[in-house]
């Protein structure tokens, strides 16, 4: 059975070697092998559950003194089985092409979540783990088990049976409500019916994809792949606002009562466990450590960015007044449009021109080549690997002649698919070959469509592939611990810098029609223009929703209504005019998994800019530096505090100096 296959290397790592030491990886085969229908999927889920119970029975049967081998190993094996089952269900419910399969997977996701909640509230398992003497264990093992024990205590393991039952019930309800919250957003796709004349300003390849019908109109489904071009380039304000509403107000109004339910349930759970609020509960195990520290951090970000953001917005308003002299500010749906105009005229950078050098397949291949060189890995296409849909691109990861992982690229929009950009872990740890999937919504995927990416879309690709590499590397360890949530974005935000690097861009950016390499002057203009908008973009994309998220989860909705919080935070932190009816809490998909902790993007950005100081800016692909970063930060993630790993890499504690300098454009 798979349990036995995982258990042997896990014992070796936990007993005899550091958690980050290289170990031969067992290969149970591709995760999607044999999953041809829902029956096969159900059988796989049942096997995961059976392996979980087998491991827990081994743990419970112990009569002699508790040890790593007889207690920690079977516990981590059970945990691994449950997590891998949940990961597979999450992928299927978000990405499978068949609606029936997605619904079946969602039911399984709920069942797995219930079993995880039961394990996380099992006093006998907790007592068994707590009885293990770890005084002579290596530090990584002590850290991981210590975090596991703390998670049990945060689940109320020391409370009465009635409280534990209530905790489990609340967690199950939160999970169900959270799925509904996400589904309401991703299923809410609007379609625009427009006359071609309304699309003035749009790129030629975009227009070519939408031929007028018999009535002379074009029909555009507003997916993430085409929303950004419409918002950025359409000259007609009404088109920009329609695209913005479709893309960034999805889930509204359906999610208005759902977010209230999430707030109420999470507040009840937190107070039941002795915390003053969900924000206090959710921030406690993070690097920040408390909601108070998060608020101080956000105040620091606000102070650091406010003056620069005002200067940038004034520049946008001045440009808008050239065409609209009466303008007093910038409306939210149009800020990218006016930003594009400023970059064209003040920085000689035209994003439409650059798009022609960023067809999907070249960006993909460039990213693969860059990160393969950095981390001394080989990424091989593996077309025979079983996948969940015909659009999925499978790859194998090789190192020194050995297969060390697999990943899957599911990169273009389709009906019923998860509508954002994310890395989905499929199998991590336990001594088995790790597997990860990117599920994204980039342009392309249709016959004859080159899939031209916006420069920002290219950066998103680098970001998401950074998540994938991070998971593959730390997932090779048999012992995989939880990474603090406010560090998880730092490695991927760091690798966004590679999208700005001239050498990396030259390696893949070629015109989709002529094959001509990207001109040097376009690279230079791109880099110059990148400095404009950093401050206000940090404000609207990170600071504003970060403040909103922590305020939403500090009180229940009956004490502080969601609409009132939205109005208060928007007035204080959103520098643009929001459309009527705009309620970001109903439409921000991160608000379920991140809850109060959206601040992690800013926190991670500060760390990422500091990590970058450890690299050679003139040679970002230097494998010596990258290998050290891989071995010191990425591979051992989750087996030590992230702040400790960063300090080992930098030779000092991290600070915000590099981030502040970047915000001001120093060193560009």
Image (cartoon, rainbow, N blue to C red):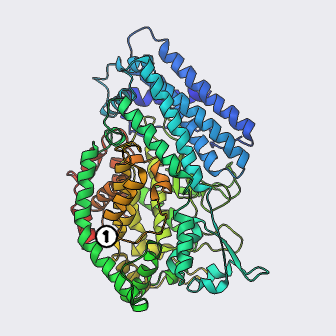
> Residue 477 location in percent, x, y?
44, 39
Q: Is residue 667 left or right of residue 196?
A: left
- Quarter holding the C terminus is bottom left
Q: Which residue is mark 1?
A: 535
> Residue 91 location in percent, x, y?
60, 46
Task: Please report the residue visible at 53 percent of the width from the left and 71 percent of the height from the top.
Answer: 228
Secondary structure beneath dot 1 equals helix
Task: Please report the residue visible at 35 percent of the width from the left and 16 percent of the height from the top.
Answer: 131
Task: Please report the residue visible at 69 percent of the width from the left and 48 percent of the height from the top.
Answer: 386
> Residue 469 location in percent, x, y?
46, 53
Q: Is 79 placed above or below 580 here?
A: above
Q: Is residue 605 left or right of residue 374?
A: left
Which residue is most to the right? 214
Q: Quadrant of residue 304?
A: bottom left
> Residue 616 location in percent, x, y?
30, 66
Q: Is 150 placed above or below 496 here?
A: above
């Amino acid at each position: 059975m798979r349990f036995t296959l995982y258990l042997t290397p896990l014992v070796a790592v936990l007993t005899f070697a550091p958690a980050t030491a290289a170990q031969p990886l067992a290969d149970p085969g591709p995760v999607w092998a044999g999953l041809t229908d829902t029956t096969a999927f159900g059988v796989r889920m049942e096997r995961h559950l059976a392996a979980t119970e087998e491991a827990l029975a081994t743990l419970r049967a112990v009569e002699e003194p508790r040890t790593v081998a007889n207690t920690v190993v079977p516990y981590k094996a059970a945990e691994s089985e449950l997590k891998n089952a949940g990961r597979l269900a999450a992928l299927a419910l978000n990405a499978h092409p068949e609606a029936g399969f997605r619904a079946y997977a969602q039911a399984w996701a709920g069942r797995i979540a219930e079993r995880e909640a039961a394990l996380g509230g099992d006093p006998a398992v907790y007592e068994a783990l707590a009885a293990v003497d770890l005084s002579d264990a290596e530090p990584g093992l002590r850290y991981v088990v210590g975090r596991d024990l703390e998670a049990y205590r945060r689940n109320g393991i020391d409370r009465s049976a009635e409280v534990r039952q209530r905790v489990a019930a609340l967690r199950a309800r939160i999970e169900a409500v959270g799925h509904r919250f996400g589904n309401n957003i991703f299923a809410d796709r609007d379609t625009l019916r427009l006359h071609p004349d309304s699309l003035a300003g749009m790129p030629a390849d975009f227009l070519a994809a939408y031929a007028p019908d018999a009535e002379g109109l074009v029909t555009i489904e507003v997916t993430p792949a085409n929303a950004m071009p419409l918002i950025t380039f359409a000259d007609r304000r009404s088109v920009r606002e329609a695209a913005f509403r479709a893309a960034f107000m999805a889930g509204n109004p359906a999610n208005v009562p759902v977010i209230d339910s999430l707030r109420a349930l999470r507040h009840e759970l937190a107070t039941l466990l002795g915390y003053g609020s969900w924000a206090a509960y959710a921030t406690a195990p993070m690097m920040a450590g408390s909601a108070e520290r998060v608020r101080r951090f956000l105040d620091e970000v606000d102070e650091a960015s406010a003056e620069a953001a005002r200067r940038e917005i004034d520049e946008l308003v001045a440009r808008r007044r050239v065409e609209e002299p009466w303008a007093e500010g910038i409306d939210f749906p149009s800020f990218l449009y006016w930003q594009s105009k400023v970059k064209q005229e003040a920085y000689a950078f035209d994003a439409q021109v650059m798009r022609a050098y960023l067809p999907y397949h070249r960006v993909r291949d460039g990213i693969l080549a860059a990160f393969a060189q950095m981390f001394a890995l080989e990424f091989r296409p593996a077309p025979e690997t079983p996948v969940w849909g015909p659009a999925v691109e499978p790859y194998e990861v090789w190192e020194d002649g050995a297969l060390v992982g697999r990943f899957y690229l599911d990169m273009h929009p389709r009906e019923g698919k998860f509508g954002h950009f994310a890395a989905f872990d499929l199998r991590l740890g336990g001594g088995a070959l790790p597997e990860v999937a990117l599920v994204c919504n980039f342009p392309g995927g249709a016959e004859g469509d080159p899939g031209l990416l916006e420069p920002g879309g290219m950066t998103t690709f680098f970001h998401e592939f950074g998540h994938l590499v991070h998971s593959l590397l730390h997932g090779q360890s048999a012992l995989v611990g939880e990474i603090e949530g406010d560090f998880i974005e730092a490695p991927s935000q760091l690798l966004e810098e590679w999208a700005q690097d001239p050498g990396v861009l030259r390696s893949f950016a070629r015109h989709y029609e002529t094959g001509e390499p990207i001109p040097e002057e376009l690279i230079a203009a791109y880099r110059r223009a990148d400095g404009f908008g950093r401050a206000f973009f940090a404000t609207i994309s990170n600071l504003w929703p970060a403040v909103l998220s922590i305020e939403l989860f500090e009180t229940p909705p009956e004490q502080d209504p969601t609409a009132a919080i939205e109005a208060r935070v928007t007035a204080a932190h959103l520098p643009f005019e929001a459309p009527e009816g705009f309620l970001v809490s109903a439409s921000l998909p991160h608000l379920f998994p991140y809850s109060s902790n959206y601040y992690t993007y800013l926190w991670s950005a500060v760390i990422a800019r500091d990590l970058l100081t450890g690299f050679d800016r003139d040679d970002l692909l230097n494998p010596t530096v990258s290998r050290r970063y891989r071995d010191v930060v990425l591979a051992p993630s989750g087996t030590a505090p992230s702040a400790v790993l960063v300090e080992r890499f930098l030779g000092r504690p991290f600070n915000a100096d590099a981030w502040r300098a970047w915000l001001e454009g120093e060193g560009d």
